[in-house]
Amino acid sequence: METRGASPRAAAISFGIGQHHLRRLIREGAVTPRAVGRRSIVLFSELEAALRALPPTKSSKGEARHAA
């Protein structure tokens, strides 16, 4: 079965970002954690959309040209 969400800590690790960065995305409203009992769950689809909305790095523009 495909994992669709995890605790904020596990979600940050799964996406290779720091917990501080994920908490900032939550605070800014880009990601909304869901309450399941006493636990918070971050949906991977929502986190992925928030990360895709971030601006690309300066070095990634050069990489796109070389990949084509």
Image (cartoon, grey):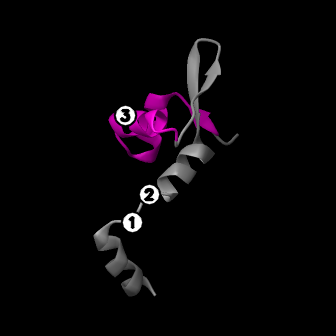
Q: Nearer the viewer, mark 3 or mark 2?
A: 2
In the image, what residue occupies the spot 58% across and 28% down? 41
The three-letter amino acid code for the residue at tag 1 is Pro
Name the residue beneath numbered marker 2. Answer: 54
Q: Is residue 31 above or below residue 66?
A: above
Determine the CA span between mark 3 and mark 2.
17 Å
The three-letter amino acid code for the residue at tag 3 is Gln
Whether residue 60 sits left or right of residue 32 in the image: it is: left
Which percent across, then down, holds residue 47?
A: 54, 45
What stretch of residues is rendered in magenta?
4-29
Badge 3: how crowded within 10 Å, few (<14), some, or many (20+)? some
Determine the CA span between mark 1 and mark 2.
6 Å
Q: Residue 56 — which label?
A: 1
Q: Is residue 62 above or below residue 27?
A: below
Name the residue beneath numbered marker 3. Answer: 19
The three-letter amino acid code for the residue at tag 2 is Leu
